[in-house]
Amino acid sequence: MQGIGGMGNLMKQAKKLQAELERKQEELARMKVEASSGGGMVTATVNGRGELLNLAIEKEVVDPDDVDMLADLIIAAVQEAQKNARDRSQELLGPLAQGLNLPGIPGS
């Protein structure tokens, strides 16, 4: 009957990890991460999931004759903010994967 007790313990651990994962995912949704480009002329804010929340553009960078440069600055700011959000997400969720301690799963 050792196997049944072990299974119950595993189920408890799984429920605990699921609750912790849900809590961390909610924390990520509330988290705000910023990045800027063009010396701060364009600033993107994303949540911990990488979803764009805000985009601030200084008037001085808006040049109707150079729309491509503005687009490049926007893309750079958004991509950097999303990368920062992914990094923060990995920091937050990484320890949960290690806590699983399941055979055959790398990092656990």
Image (cartoon, rainbow, N blue to C red):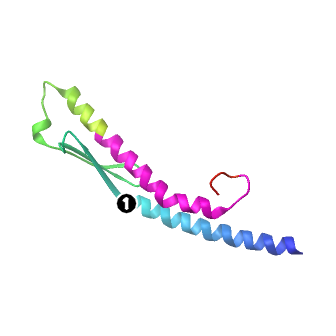
Res 29 → quadrant? bottom left
Residue at position x 68%, y 52% from top? 105
Q: Residue furthest left?
A: 60
The kind of secondary structure element at disc 1 is loop
- The spot of residue 74 in percent (x, y) is 26, 38
Residue at position x 72%, y 69% from top? 11
Q: Magenta includes 50?
A: no
Quadrant in the picture for the C terminus: bottom right
Answer yes or no: is residue 51 visible: no
Quadrant in the picture for the N terminus: bottom right
The segment highlighted magenta reads: 77-104
Q: Residue furthest front?
A: 107
Above or below: residue 65 compared with residue 33? above
Q: Residue furthest right?
A: 1
Please indicate whether residue 79 sits to the left or right of residue 99 in the image: left
What's the magenta bit mostly, secondary-structure-wise?
helix
Residue at position x 34%, y 47% from top? 81
Please indicate whether residue 74 sits to the left or right of residue 30 in the image: left
Q: Magenta includes 82?
A: yes
Answer yes or no: is residue 48 visible: yes
State how many labels appear: 1
Please indicate whether residue 39 sits to the left or right of residue 20 in the image: left
Q: Which residue is mark 1?
A: 31
Residue at position x 65%, y 51% from top? 106
Please name whichever residue, 21 or 88, is drawn nearer the observer in this view of the structure: 88
- The spot of residue 107 in percent (x, y) is 62, 54
Res 60 → quadrant? top left
- The spot of residue 73 in percent (x, y) is 24, 36
Q: Assess disc 1: are there few (<14), some (14-19) or many (≥20) residues with their C-alpha within 10 Å of its C-alpha.
A: some
- The spot of residue 72 in percent (x, y) is 26, 32
Which amino acid, mark 1?
Answer: Met
